[in-house]
Amino acid sequence: MSHDAPSSDRPARTLADIARLAGVSTGTVSRALAGSSLVNAETRERIQALAAANDFRVNQMARRLRTQKTGVIGVVVPLGHERRQHLSDPFFMTILGHLADALTENGYDVMLSRVIPNATDWLERIVDSGMLDGVLLIGQSDQMAAIERVARRYRPLVAWGSSLPGQVHCAVGTENVAGGRIAAEHLIARGVRRIAFLGELRAPEIRARFEGVCAAAAAAGLPAPLQLDTHLASEMMEREIAAHLTRHLDRIDGIAAGSDMIAMTTLRVLADQGMAVPSDVPVIGYDDLPLGLQTVPRLTTVRQDIARGARAMVERLFARIAGQDAPSLVMEPELVVRDSA
């Protein structure tokens, strides 16, 4: 009997045993058992079937000690500017789904954190924990200084958000000024002359969208848009919008919202107040979340390609983990015209 492979009554105990049975290298076995897409599907399934037939389990702790990798990526949502917002927010759930798919398909686990940054070193605590191979931030919030500080020494860090001149950290997001501008230009082309912008400006993305709305109004010779602070936390949003519209509706004839969730809530408040959209007040959102197709009327919005952006975040993170450079990506926004404007 050959001793080069496990016998039928002696199950495989090591990666080398599985490799000999499968006729591949131990590295291929390791990647296949981690679910890596680097191994073609047929080989991966064959190796996983052999492992299952031999009741083989990879010793994860030993592998991590050997490779100095944890196999875990942190996905962190910092909420400095909006502390009452929840992970159940549809924007977070949309981008989180795309990120988790891309990470798990490449053999990584995900550690999810919603962080209220009460301490200045909140991000240092995460990256220095020894638990993660890299960090993806969903949003920059009002924490640009903390992110920049950490990014100067910790390279496997990528954020969803704005890319500003001189910025150190890698970010993926939309050209938000352009997005705000095309939203306002569309309203102006419809005959809107008194634009309101609903959104709170401490987050850099929302502020940039407002700047774009202001630029379009100025270019058309119109008054500066009325900026009305509107939080992203769901329990506050509807009450704030209702108060804004009760107080200011006679001063505005079109609304550009800082996000789709703000826009969709605005549609409901306007309906409650007996206003017709778009004939009385056209409304435009920002994000192009799937929920925008379910509103009545269906939501006109500025599209961020969230799926593409999530893939780009993961690709850049993997490049940085490998010691390579990976620049920021600024995606062009796209106006999606539906019924609300």
Image: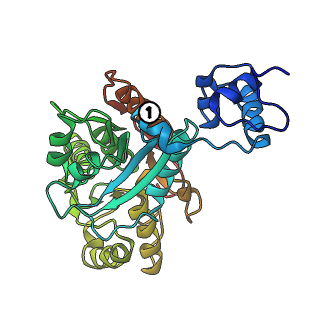
Location of the N terminus (image quadrant): top right
Front residue of this view, candidates 272 and 253: 272
Name above or below for residue 234 compared with residue 328: below
**Helix, strand or loop at mark 1:** helix
Instruction: Residue 305: tell me if it is visible.
Output: no
- To which quarter of the image does residue 248 belong? bottom left
Graded by Cα atoms within 10 Å as few (under 14), some (14 to 19) or many (20 or more), the crowding at tag 1 reads few
Name above or below for residue 196 compared with residue 76: below
Front residue of this view, candidates 159 and 157: 157
* Residue 163 screen position, x and y as percent: 25, 36
**Residue at 28 percent of width and 55 percent of height:** 193
Name above or below for residue 330 compared with residue 301: above
* Residue 46 screen position, x and y as percent: 77, 31
* Residue 323 screen position, x and y as percent: 33, 23
User: How many marks on residues?
Assistant: 1
**Residue at 73 percent of width and 38 percent of height:** 51
Instruction: Residue 102: tell me if it is visible.
Output: yes
Front residue of this view, candidates 228 and 332: 332
**Residue at 37 percent of width and 77 percent of height:** 235
- To which quarter of the image does residue 29 belong? top right
In this figure, which colouring scheme has been used for the structure? rainbow
Amino acid residing under circle 1:
Arg
Instruction: Judge from the rendering whether residue 333 lies leftward or rightward of residue 16; answer left or right.
Output: left
Name above or below for residue 322 compared with residue 199: above
* Residue 194 screen position, x and y as percent: 26, 58
Which residue is under mark 1? 66
**Residue at 35 percent of width and 30 percent of height:** 329
